[in-house]
Image: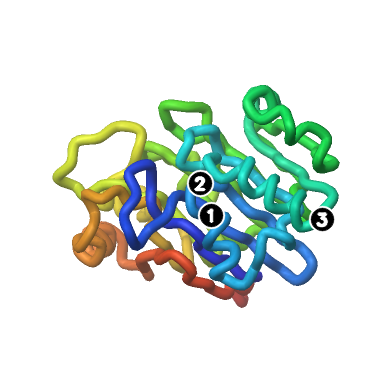
Amino acid sequence: MQLTFLGTGAAMVTGERFQTGVVINDGDRRVLVDCGSGVLHRLEQSGIGYESIDTILLTHHHLDHVADLFPLMKARWLAGEGSLEVVGPPATMTLIERLFDAHAYMQDRLELTVREIEPGSHEVGGFTVEAVETIHSLYCLAYRFDDLVVLSGDTEPSDAVVSLADGVPVLVHECAFPDDVEVSNHTRPTELGALLRSVDVGRVYLTHFYPHCSGREASMRDAVRHEWDGDVRIAEDLLTISVAPVEG
């Protein structure tokens, strides 16, 4: 399995980090998780291409996770791609319908399937996906793919989200602000490190950085390591990693 970070930023973007988007790819199976502003460009820059994206899985509906959804749909239509599946938490259908209300010319341009999911086990794009609810200002889901990768979505420190990652080789977890920024709805590095002590995870990639983190990513990584003696890395836009099952 491969994971490509398309956007590792947040609602307040920086020049180096676009908004949220990650591609999970394993042979003929491919899912784009979230589609924030800049993801359409990153798909082309990565060589993956929007033509190859048949399934989009949304964690939640904040703009920095959905802003490029309709631009991607229009690009696929213009490229002659016929279909797309959008999967997400409750109200995903309402989101799509309201976007069509604002862009009526896009009606019927694609064979569009919209599916809403709740916490539990699901099939998405050929992957087995386990979902749990996060702690956020808007209903949000974290996802575990084929017992290999967990994506946290947006969340305050959550035992349920970190427990979802127990036994996986890779956890991608938001770390939106440094420890000295008072914040709700997101996780800071020391908080994440304390949670990680209770689970067995191979590697952790920090992502979803606000501008407050610029130039401080290394110290944030070290703050996680101070609490958890594990492999902690910084996600960057266009970074691709390989994920294999843990041996033994």
Q: How many marks can you see? A: 3
Q: Nearer the viewer, mark 1 or mark 3?
A: 3
Q: Callout 2, which amino acid?
A: Gly
Q: Callout 1: 10 Å neighbours few (<14), some, many (20+)?
A: many
In the rendered image, residue 216, in percent from the top left (x then y), is placed at: 20, 60
Q: Secondary structure at mark 1?
A: helix
Q: Secondary structure at mark 2?
A: loop
User: In the depicted view, which residue is nearer to us: 16 or 184?
Assistant: 16
In the rendered image, residue 106, in percent from the top left (x then y), is placed at: 74, 35
Instruction: Specify the label residue 36 is tagged with.
Output: 2
Q: Callout 3: 10 Å neighbours few (<14), some, many (20+)?
A: few
Q: Quadrant of residue 99?
A: top right
Sequence order check, earlier mark of 3 and 2 = 2
- State how far apart marks 1 and 3 are (Cα): 20 Å
Q: Work out which quarter of the rendered image holds the C terminus and state it.
A: bottom right
Q: Which residue is mark 3?
A: 80
Sequence order check, earlier mark of 1 and 3 = 1
Q: Secondary structure at mark 3?
A: loop
Q: Quadrant of residue 168?
A: bottom right
Instruction: Specify the label residue 178 is tagged with.
Output: none
Q: Residue at left 53%, top 72%?
A: 240
Q: Nearer the viewer, mark 3 or mark 2?
A: 3
Q: Is residue 224 left or right of residue 66?
A: left
Pointer 1 with pointer 2, Cβ within 8 A: yes
Q: Callout 2: 10 Å neighbours few (<14), some, many (20+)?
A: many
User: In the depicted view, which residue is nearer to us: 129 or 83?
Assistant: 83
Q: Callout 1, which amino acid?
A: Val
- State how far apart marks 3 and 2 are (Cα): 23 Å
Q: Which residue is mark 1?
A: 39
Q: Work out which quarter of the rendered image holds the N terminus and state it.
A: bottom right
